[in-house]
Image (tube, rainbow, N blue to C red):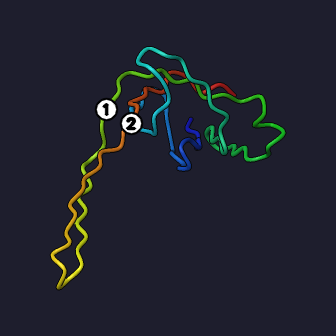
Amino acid sequence: MYAVIRTGGKQYKVEEGQILDVELLGEPGAEVEMVPLLLVDGDSVTANPDLLGQARVAATVVDSVKGRKIDGFTYKNKSNQRRRWGHRQHKSRIKITAIKA
């Protein structure tokens, strides 16, 4: 059984026991419940919003991590104007504990 969930403006295909990095959700140890967008159980596929209202995907926040570094550089020629910057997005590492239909 697997489900498709949406968090942080992105969609993820998840299964029980899977560990993935998503946008910041909370402190490590926190329990998170999400409503799936799609639920596949063997041959049956559930995509009806009325039936998915009762389904839940439970996850636990395992750790807080940082994403990969993004380097940026801007300049204007002939004026000696330069700016260098970097950014690392904070993420939550979650473990999918249960998919309840």
* Above-or-below relation of 31 to 81: above
Question: Foreground residue, 26 or 53?
Answer: 26
- Give the percent coordinates (x, y) of residue 81: 20, 72
Mark 1, other Cα within 10 Å: few <14 / some 14–19 / many ≥20: some
Residue at 61% x, 25% y is 33
Kindly give the residue lying farthest to the right in the view shown: 50
Relative side of 99 to 47, left or right: left
Tell me which amino acid carries mark 1. Answer: Val
Q: In this view, does 15 lie to the left or right of 52?
A: left
56 left or right, relative to 9 = right
SS of the residue at dot 1? strand
Q: Quadrant of the C terminus?
A: top right
> Which residue position is annotated with label 2?
91
Dividing the picture into quadrants, the one containing residue 92 is: top left
Most distant residue in the bottom direction = 78
Q: Quadrant of residue 40?
A: top right
- In this picture, is 18 found above or below 42? above
**Nearer to me, 78 or 38:** 78
Mark pair 2, 1: CA separation: 5 Å
Instruction: Check contact, mark 2 vs mark 1: CB within 8 A.
Output: yes
**Farthest residue toward the front?**
79
The one of 45 and 98 positioned closer to us in this rendering: 98
Q: Where is residue 22 in the image (x, y as percent from the top left)?
A: 44, 39
Residue 21 percent location from the top left of the image: 39, 37
Tell me the residue at 53%/44% (across/down). Answer: 8
> Which residue was labeled with disc 1?
65
Query: Type of residue at label 2?
Result: Lys
Q: Earlier in the sequence, mark 2 or mark 1?
A: 1
